[in-house]
Image: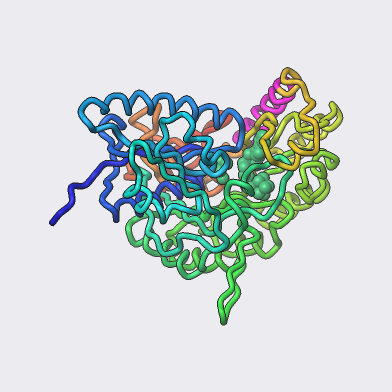
Amino acid sequence: MKMARKLVYVETYGCQMNVGDTEIILSILRDNGYDRTEVMEEADLILANTCSIRDNAEQRIHGRIARFAQEKRRGTADGTAPLVGIVGCMAERLKDKLLESGVVDLVVGPDAYRSLPGLLAAVRPDNPQMDVQLSRDETYADIRPVRTDRLGVSAFISIMRGCNNVCSYCVVPYTRGAERSRDAHSIVREAREVFEAGYKEVTLLGQNVDSYLWKSADETVNFAELLRRVAAIDPLLRVRFATSHPKDISDEVIETMASMPNICRHIHLPVQSGSTRMLELMRRKYSREWYLERVARIREVLGEDCGLTTDVIAGFCTETEQDHADTLSLMEEVGFDWAFMFQYSERPGTLAQRHYPDDIPPEVKTRRLEEIIALQNRKSLERYRAQIGKVHEVLVEGPSKKNPAEICGRASNSMMCVFPGSHPAGTYVRVRVVDCTSATLICEEI
Ligand code: SAH
Ligand code: SF4
Ligand code: F3S
């Protein structure tokens, strides 16, 4: 007898790890009778894959839960009320508190997705289900993710889970558990499969990719070796990775990038602050000088044009005007291509929340963040302008959003390029940069 298939609708928040996890969840559900829909109103199961990194990320989800509640009411009369599940980092952090609203039927943490079918079979309107067990060894290595990107050009591959650092501001070690590296062979196999399916780019994902380390009885694979193996699949497969940690990025990784042209010339290297005193309080385990030395090494080996991007936090505990000025001067000195910039948001249970006062007034945080953003905008424009006249190889992603007669795609250094043309997604095109904005290179094909 064939069971009627059901429909699952998923919203994904947070980082690329969550995007990858949604693809794992869809794979597990597909094998258990659920197809994906992009229309919430027809779903039998509504999932939100959530993020806890800052308070505003969580507030947004609470707003969505209120919206899902309306959707449940829609179906109570005819018995088609959808189930609502909260998965991901907020599920792990808030656990059964999420059940209090009476809206949520399912709470599942990032290491418990294999139990979804069992939980779904057990769930009843008056009997919500929860699994927030963290794991020391779960990497979902054997699960083939259902790709959710529309273009079929670029795929994310998780190479590790969790995080063993304890940056004092950060909730991730609590929501994602201890660090563990995935079987290197399963990563290379997945990369080969997506390449054979027509993808041209893979991004290897972890909270701290430089500490990737996988051991079996007869081999040990570190991140540099993993990069070599993935890049060796085919010269036409581009390899990207994120996130690198300044304390761990090694000369071997930088030199491996230099030795293989299909490893993209871009490093996302979150600095967080330019003040060594702040970095100590943040427990980042490097100093301003160490960070600048790593940048110098990257530029020496990979050249001035290597893409370099970062994350910055404004207004962390006890931050003085001098500490803030140190952040601005570091950003001035390095000249990042772009950055993610945030105000510090205190997270319950973290070291900072337990030991330091969140003592920078909101208006001061806002003003410092504005100064950081203004400086970065100026630096971005400088960095993009410096590309005018240069030649890049672009991997086409599709038509430009602004002008359908143009196509867009990224250069190896991760800068977005637009140019007139009609090549299909997945083609490599050589272009020359003729103009720019602070976020786009305007090019022509050569
Ligand atoms: N693993 C990565 C970053 C993960 S979180 C790394 O170590 O670099 C992404 C970014 O969110 C961080 O780099 C940091 O800049 C920011 N972030 C993390 N916790 C935060 C908090 N409590 N308040 C504001 N920003 C935060
Ligand atoms: Fe958070 Fe630090 Fe781990 Fe990054 S390295 S996820 S900032 S604890
Ligand atoms: Fe957010 Fe969790 Fe990623 S807290 S940033 S979704 S690891």
Please provide percent x and percent y for residue 378.
67, 27
* Rendered view: 427 above or below 54: below
Instruction: Residue 310: tell me if it is visible.
Output: no
Q: Nearer the viewer, residue 292 or 85?
A: 85
Secondary structure mainly formed by the magenta segment: helix
Judge left or right: residue 400 versus residue 324. left
Please provide percent x and percent y for residue 324.
80, 30
* Location of the N terminus (image quadrant): bottom left
* Rendered view: 77 above or below 17: above
* Location of the C terminus (image quadrant): top left
Identify the residue at image location x=74%, y=36%.
353
Judge left or right: residue 410 versus residue 6. right
Identify the residue at image location x=49%, y=64%.
230
Identify the residue at image location x=47%, y=55%.
157
- What sort of colour scheme is used for the picture? rainbow
Q: Nearer the viewer, residue 302 or 140?
A: 140
Q: Is residue 382 magenta?
A: yes
Work out which residue is located at the far top of the displayed protein and give it: 363
Which residues are the magenta region? 366-384
Q: Is residue 376 magenta?
A: yes
Identify the residue at image location x=37%, y=63%.
193
